[in-house]
Image: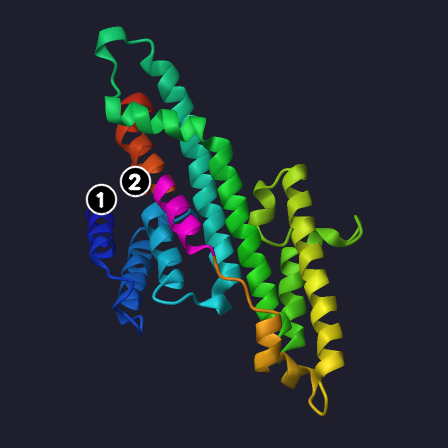
């Protein structure tokens, strides 16, 4: 589809470090919206992976837009779903490829990518979860020390809704739907870490506030030296996005023969 190809080319040419006002990013977003309006059947389908990756990198660079962390995690979850789907297809492709002896349809390079995709599945999942937990912690750390306490609790309830009683609990964020019971426990551990930070930072601020308010103490140099905000795992995150992009691209290219893959999206 020419519209998608044109959009992909625009994204490939885009420099995330030289668009501080996001003017070009806004133009790309409008181009995507125009495609959806023209082809209404696409409105209820997830965006193509390359569009999601562009959106994530637009939030990451040139500096991370922390106010969009929740939306960032929604989209990162879609990337993980693409990876899980690609892993299933790669595993099937490897098995099918073994049936063809000397006329195997997969090139050596594609087969190598598929083998890596399947072999490293647990490692990629662990990396995804590590990035997610760090993003949640950083987001809540920043909101806790900000002036708006209500914003903090909105995010807390969004990320940790499962901590409520069974009759009230609900999955309120996309990332919850891909988590196993063990992984929910990891999310619980992140909630505990945030709670410990809340208690520790409040206790310290009470001891060192002098004539200042708690909010003013949170904003002080000595507080930020005592409780520095952790950094987003940029290198881990970019590596993860590149891995998924490579895996999904390999599946798409080989899938036209192996799976009768439909490239409408």
Could you say whether the residue bearing mark 1 is in a helix, strand or loop? loop
Magenta span contains residue 11: no
Residue 70 percent coordinates (x, y) = 53, 60
Seen in the image, is 263 located left or right of residue 46? left
Residue 83 seen from this side: yes
For the view shown, which residue lies furthest in the bottom direction?
A: 211
Residue 114 percent coordinates (x, y) = 35, 27
Measured in 3D between alpha carbons, the distance from the residue under mark 2 to the one under mark 1, in whole angstroms, is: 7 Å
Query: What residue is disc 1 on?
Result: 1
Q: Residue at x 48, y 65 (%)?
A: 68
Label 1 environment density (alpha carbons within 10 Å; few <14, some 14–19, many ≥20): few
Label 2 environment density (alpha carbons within 10 Å; few <14, some 14–19, many ≥20): few
* Numbered circle sitting on residue 263: none
**Figure check: 210 above or below 262:** below
**Figure check: 148 above or below 105:** below
Q: Residue at x 32, y 48 (%)?
A: 50
**Figure check: 150 above or below 48:** below
Seen in the image, is 227 located left or right of residue 95? right
Q: Residue at x 64, y 85 (%)?
A: 216
Q: Does the CB distance between marks 2 and 1 fall below 8 Å? A: yes
Residue 146 seen from this side: no
Could you say whether the residue bearing mark 2 is in a helix, strand or loop? loop
First along the sequence among labels 2 and 1: 1
Magenta span contains residue 242: yes
* Numbered circle sitting on residue 264: 2
Look at the image and tell me in which quarter the N terminus lies.
top left
In this view, the residue in front, 209 or 141, is 209
Residue 172 percent coordinates (x, y) = 63, 54
Q: How is the image coloured?
A: rainbow
Q: Magenta span covers which residues?
A: 233-243
Q: Residue at x 69, y 71 (%)?
A: 201
């Amino acid at each position: 589809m020419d519209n998608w190809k044109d959009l992909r080319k625009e994204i490939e040419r885009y420099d995330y470090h030289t668009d501080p006002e996001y003017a070009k990013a806004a133009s790309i977003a409008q181009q995507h919206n125009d495609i959806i309006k023209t082809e209404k059947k696409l409105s209820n389908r997830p965006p193509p992976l390359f569009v999601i990756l562009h959106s994530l990198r637009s939030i990451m660079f040139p500096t991370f837009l922390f106010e969009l962390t929740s939306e960032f995690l929604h989209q990162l979850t879609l990337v993980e779903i693409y990876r899980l789907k690609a892993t299933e297809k790669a595993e099937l492709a490897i098995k099918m490829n073994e049936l063809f002896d000397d006329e195997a349809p997969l090139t050596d390079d594609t087969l190598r990518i598929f083998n890596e995709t399947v072999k490293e599945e647990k490692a990629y999942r662990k990396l995804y979860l590590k990035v997610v937990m760090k993003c949640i912690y950083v987001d809540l750390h920043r909101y806790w020390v900000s002036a708006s306490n209500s914003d903090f609790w909105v995010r807390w309830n969004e990320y940790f809704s499962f901590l409520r009683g069974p009759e009230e609990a609900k999955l309120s964020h996309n990332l919850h739907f891909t988590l196993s019971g063990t992984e929910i426990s990891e999310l619980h551990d992140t909630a505990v870490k945030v709670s410990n930070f809340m208690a520790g930072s409040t206790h310290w601020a009470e001891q060192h506030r002098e004539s200042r308010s708690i909010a003013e103490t949170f904003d002080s140099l000595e507080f930020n030296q005592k409780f520095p905000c952790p950094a987003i795992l940029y290198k881990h995150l970019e590596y993860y996005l590149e891995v998924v992009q490579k895996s999904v691209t390999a599946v798409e290219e080989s899938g036209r023969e192996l799976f009768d893959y439909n490239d409408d999206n």
